[in-house]
Image (spheres, rainbow, N blue to C red):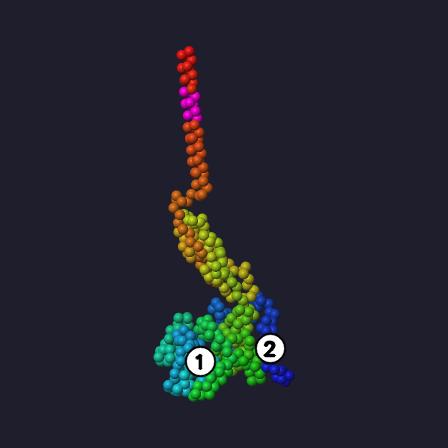
Amino acid sequence: MKYLMRMPVIHRRILAAIISFLLLFQIIPLTAEATAAHTPQIIAPRAILMDAETGTVLYDKNAHEITFPASTTKVLTALLVLENASLTDVVHIDYEPGVTGSSMYILPGESFTVETLLRALLIRSANDAAEVLGRHIAGSVEAYVDLMNQRAAQLGAVQTHFVNPHGLPHEEHVTTAYDLALISREAMKHELFREIVASPALIIPETGHMEQRVYNNSNRFLWGVGPRHQMIYQGQSTNIAYDPVDGIKTGYTNSARNCLISSALFNDQRFIAVVLNAEQENVYADSRTLLDYGFQFFHHLTLVEEGMMTGSVPVTNGTADSVSLYAAQTVRHVFPRNVLPDDIRREIHLPDENVPAPVENGAALGWIDYYYADEFLGQVKLITHEAIDFVPQYMRISPFAYGSVGFLALFLLWQGQVYRLRRKRQKIRLRRAARYRQTQSIE
């Protein structure tokens, strides 16, 4: 251990990454039974693991129980900022925010861009930044909280009810692990949000009222190495820092205890873990247990790619006899690793009769339903990528038919001409014969 501590920081981090990789992908039989047998065991009373791409819930422990969220509230606060404010706007603070708890210590007379305040909100977990942003966007903290609750409901987070933008304790300021996962999944769709929550530190230049501010991210998953940042994971003491983690938000109050929303990305798979009301470093061990469970036992399968041709249907009275159909969108799903593409059943639904022309480009002429066992996975519309025009009856004769008719007409004209020539020659012969007989009778 002493030797390890004498190693340069960069070497310790590389070693930690290698150990993390080996622990993450230890060889485990990936059968359905193994997946069930290795359901994660966590200490926190409430938690969830959600697939970020599809929203599928992979683990649930009292995830719909209402509880206190502490500063995980700020994920929704930040989402509203990203959706409703200009990041380059400069906010001048001419009052004392006066919010307790974690703070960036804003002083009257200071000015900051919305983006700087947003970074302080998420990295420093600054309660004063939350109130300043709320007033700037909605005119008052109360009006901003109304917007937050409306947005939560739109996302399906129907058990969420906030009374402030920062998460300080209030008996009516509540949510669930499931709701926080939904909100975080939406926030992670924003590139700037992903960049901020993955930042290990924040530097705010001096303002004339206060010298330069430097803050570590409150999320030790991003930087926690060394003796003071250890946790017990799988029976061993290890650094809290974990390379696959790229966010999202911590929280702590006496009533909420330790709360953590984590995002981790590995091999193009992202999972979101929410652990609420945990004790001390257990919040990190529980979160990593859930994330590792996702990486070890689940993978994504593409059921169909957008634009993939999946069949055709016959067309009547059109410029073509049939029209090809293509998937309108990509459909992906997360499965236990033992599930293979051949295990997915699909049911194709097409029109029972020929489609009459005209057919528009982009017309939906069918769909495909996807199932695994008896579970409905999703549906994709089948659309056209070309237009088929209507053709009148007289124009539907093929060029070959036109050629045949033309040939027959020419043949009949030729036969008529031959007949006329024969009749003319016959008449000439008859006249000559008549003249000959007349000459003979005179003699």
User: Which secondary structure is most common in the magenta stretch?
Assistant: helix
Query: Bounds of the magenta span?
Result: 422-431
- Looking at the rendered image, the quarter that the C terminus falls into is top left
Kindly tell me whether residue 362 is visible in this rendering.
Answer: yes
Residue 388, horizontal then vertical, whole percent = 42, 52
In screen coordinates, is 217 left or right of 395? right
Q: Amino acid at mark 2?
A: Ile
Residue 41 appears anywhere in the view = no
First in sequence: mark 1 or mark 2?
2
Res 361 → quadrant: bottom left
Q: Residue at x 49, y 58 (%)?
A: 308
Cβ atoms at labels 1 and 2 below 8 Å apart: no
Which residue was labeled with disc 1?
116
Provide residue 300's location: percent of width, then percent of height: 52, 66
Q: Given the image, on which type of amino acid does mark 1 rest?
A: Thr
Which labelled disc corresponds to residue 404?
A: none
Q: Which residue was labeled with disc 2?
A: 14
Task: Give the residue at x 54% y 74%.
Answer: 244
Which residue reaches farthest front?
443
Q: Residue 72: x, y in percent?
A: 45, 78
Instruction: Find the distance from the CA under tag 1 to the CA under tag 2.
Output: 31 Å
